[in-house]
Each structure stands twice: as C-alpha cells, then as structure tokens.
Amino acid sequence: MPVLINREGGAAKAAGDRLEAQVEAAFDAAGAQADVQMLPADGLADAIERAATEYPRIVIAGGDGTVASAAQLLTGKDVELAILPLGTLNHFARDLEIPTDLAKAAQLAAKGMAKPVDVAEVNGRRFVNNASVGLYPFMVRDREAIQDRKGWPKWLAMVPASWDAVSRLHHHRLRIDMGAGAAPIVTPLLFVGNNRYSLDAGSVGSRETVNDGKLSVYAVSHASRPALLWFGLRAALGLADRGKDFAALGDTEALTVRGHAATIEIALDGEVKQLDLPLKFKIRAGGLRVVQP
C-alpha cells in the first residue's frame, strides 16, 4: 500500500526523520505493509498519478492542501483515498472524523471502508474545504511572507497578517449568480464552501456532512474596519446575524462570479492562486471515495 507523505506538512515537518519509521510501525501494527515515501510538496502530484495506475487505494499524509492535491487528481477515478492527518489544521479530516492519532489513522487507512464525498471546483481547480476572495487570500499571502521572514509557526504568523489585512481593508465589487440571475454585491470577503459550514455557537466553521451535493455561499456585507472586527468576533462566537452581516447567503449547486478585472486572487484550501474571471464554481457530488469511519 503506497503511503505518500508531504514532508513539508505541519506535523510531518515537526516529526522530522523519525516519521518514516513511525508510519511504517503504525501500518505494521495494523497488519498492512506500507511503501512509505517521504516527498517534497512539489513531488506529490507525480507520485499520486503513478500510484493511481497501480493501486486501488492510496494513503496521503499531510494537511488540507495535500488532500486537495490528491482530490485534483483522483476525483472521478476508481481509486480510494485514505488520509493520515499530518498537517497543521486538518479541517477536512476532522469533518470526516478521521482520527489524528497516527496508530488509529493507520488502522483506518488499512482496514476502513471508502465512502463517496463531494468535491468542489472552480475553473477546473478542485478544493475539499473552501474557496475565498478578498480578505482571506491577502491574509494567507501576508502570513506566508511573515513565516518566511521570521520563521514563525502558521498560527502565530496569522495574527499580524490578519491585522494587516483589516487595516488595508478593500471591498470587491462583484456580480454573483446562484441560478436566479446575477446580483451585484460589495463585499470584503466572499466564501464558498464545499457543503454547508455552520455559523452556530459551538460548531462554527465545521460541517455536519460533506456529501449533501451543495456549495455554501457567504458574502460578508460592506463594513467599516471597526464593524468588520466586531463581525469577526461575533462570528467566532457563533453570534453572526444572518440578515445583517451577509450581503449574500445560500446553498447552490453552481455559482458564477464576475468582476471588473480580468483575473482575481483566490484562496483554495489555504493555497493562494490567481484565476481568470469569471469564476465558475460547481460541485462534484460523490466524486471522491475517501476512507472514513
């Protein structure tokens, strides 16, 4: 069984040279023989493509960006994806209740059953969690610059990056069409989720399901800097006002976003890309088979 590890992922990088032996031991304990490959992030795609021609199940070890890279290549194929959550946040694995404990995750990867999950797509780029335009791509780009410059961990670098993004607040004038005709919006942040993300207290930012066949759309209303900071605090506590805080809110199977420029910056599962406008989102219902509890 091929186990492809992004050695640059959060937990993988922290574990260092010990990780390969730890993963092999975890699969041995699960009664499976693992072909463990420690790979740089830019070598994962080729390794996944090769493995997909030889094996019915591939194990990917890394974070959300690594899983999204696998989804880009495996969606629509008769190959099962198993996940070892070795990133920093592991949102997708957590929403599927895949254990973060290495021994338990290896046991599931070796013996568990694969079930279909949805994958979202925009202009041919697939994502498993969410896509966003506006504040968040700016925050990610700034965070990465701080990490490179100061060597800070991701969570710490995000603090000054978030403040910088709000201090340079920019609103996007867009037209969005969820199937009922294009509507103009002015928003600092457009968020498109692969299935519905909760806004409720106690479950903010999580999903009950990843196989409902819907995109969730959240466009934050035009706001001043203090109002946006206040919204961010309330949203984190599950106290967002659905009527006042959002210029657009809803579920859809397809979404088109137009703007005045030829291209736009967008974050896909935390990776910043520059894509051509219009942005054409769609959901690939049940397009990826993932091993899960």
Image (cartoon, rainbow, N blue to C red):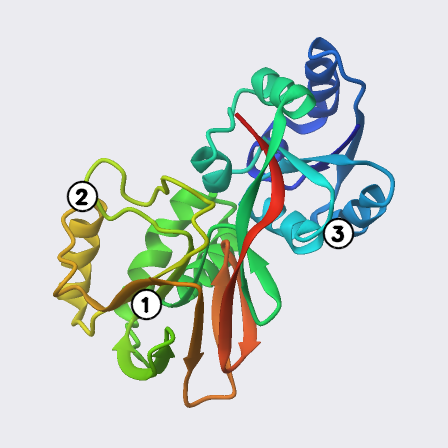
Q: Amino acid at mark 1?
A: Leu
- Say which element carries label 1: strand
Q: Residue at x 16, y 64 (%)?
A: 245
In terms of depth relative to the viewer, which is nearer, 221 or 9? Answer: 221
Q: Position of residue 82 (x, y in %)?
A: 65, 33
**Mark 3 or mark 1: whose residue is earlier in sequence:** 3
Q: Nearer the viewer, residue 11 or 206?
A: 206
**Percent coordinates x, y for residue 180 in the rendering:** 33, 78
* Residue displayed at 35% across by 42% down: 206
- Using the rendered image of the protein, determine whether residue 119 is visible from the camera's viewpoint: yes
Q: Amino acid at mark 2?
A: Leu
The image's mark for residue 237 is: 2
Residue 75, how many percent across, how many down? 66, 52
Q: Which residue is mark 1?
A: 189
Label 1 close to label 2 by CB (< 8 Å): no
Disc 3 residue type (three-letter):
Ala
Whether residues under marks 3 and 1 lie with C-beta atoms below 8 angstroms apart, the answer is no
Where does label 3 land, which residue? Answer: 45
Q: Quadrant of residue 243?
A: bottom left
Q: CA distance from mark 1 to mark 2?
A: 18 Å
On the question of residue 85 being in view, the answer is no
